[in-house]
Image (cartoon, rainbow, N blue to C red):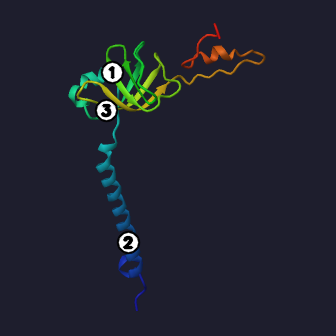
């Protein structure tokens, strides 16, 4: 009789089946992930453009899901009921007129940075369905013993007027 050797011909068939099953499973999972990633990625892309890029894209911007970013132009905000408004977004070079639906965030006002998700229409305006304000994240705590003038702090939010006559 000969001594048993450790080459693959003498490996029990069960170990070969387990190894084949593991490799086949990993291969199938990798193919499934690749198909899902490649197939659905185009539908889920959202481009971030400013007004200049929207104008430069021309007809390519029409119908594409875009996040339009810029500043809300002065004297451009018009509220149309409780859940619709129109305003202009500027980037220093170009202007895009926006018609948005939904209740705007409390911090929304003229002169603030804004990101509007929606689509450019063939009629030449941007139809927004999601409105976000962008603001600096600077927070400064009051120094120990420093008094806080809440009326001054609150003036940075929309809709608060001076106390004159109230």
Q: Which mark is residue 97?
A: 1
**Which residue bears the numbered disc 3?**
119
Q: Is residue 128 above or below residue 13?
A: above
Say whether disc 2 or disc 1 marks the residue closer to the N-terminus. 2
Q: Which mark is residue 82?
A: none
Kindly state the secondary structure of the residue where label 2 is placed: helix
Q: Is residue 32 left or right of residue 157?
A: left
Kindly state the secondary structure of the residue where label 1 is placed: strand
Mark 2, Cα crowd under 10 Å, few <14 / some 14-19 / many 20+, is: few
- Quadrant holding the C terminus: top right
Nearer to the camera, 35 or 11: 35
Mark 3, Cα crowd under 10 Å, few <14 / some 14-19 / many 20+, is: many
Q: Is residue 120 left or right of residue 142?
A: left
Q: Is residue 122 left or right of residue 127?
A: left
Q: Disc 3 and disc 1: Cα gap in Å?
A: 12 Å
Say whether disc 3 or disc 1 marks the residue closer to the N-terminus. 1
Q: Residue at x 71, y 16 (%)?
A: 148
Do we see residue 50 in this rendering? Answer: no
Residue farthest along the right direction in this orientation:
145
Q: Quadrant of residue 6?
A: bottom left
Say whether disc 2 or disc 3 marks the residue closer to the N-terminus. 2
Q: Are marks 2 and 3 in contact (CB under 8 Å)?
A: no
Q: Residue at x 71, y 19 (%)?
A: 142
Mark 1, Cα crowd under 10 Å, few <14 / some 14-19 / many 20+, is: some
- Quadrant holding the N terminus: bottom left
Q: Is residue 52 above or below residue 34?
A: above
Nearer to the camera, 10 or 47: 47
**Which residue bears the numbered disc 2?**
21
Q: Is residue 41 above or below residue 140?
A: below
Q: Residue at x 51, y 23 (%)?
A: 135
């Amino acid at each position: 009789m000969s001594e048993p050797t450790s080459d693959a011909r003498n490996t029990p068939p069960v170990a070969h089946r387990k190894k084949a099953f593991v490799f086949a499973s990993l291969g199938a999972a990798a193919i499934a992930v690749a198909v899902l990633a490649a197939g659905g990625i185009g539908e889920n892309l959202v481009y971030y453009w400013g007004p200049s890029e929207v104008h430069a894209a021309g007809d390519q911007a029409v119908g594409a899901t875009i996040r339009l970013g810029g500043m809300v132009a002065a004297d451009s905000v018009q509220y149309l009921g409780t859940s619709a408004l129109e305003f202009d977004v500027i980037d220093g070079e170009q202007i895009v007129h926006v018609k948005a639906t939904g209740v705007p965030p409390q911090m929304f006002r003229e002169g603030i940075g804004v990101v509007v998700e929606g689509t450019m229409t063939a009629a030449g305006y941007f139809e927004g369905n999601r409105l976000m304000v962008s603001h600096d994240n600077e927070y400064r705590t009051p120094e120990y013993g420093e008094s806080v003038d809440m009326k001054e702090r609150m003036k940075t939010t929309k809709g608060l007027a001076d106390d004159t006559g109230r």
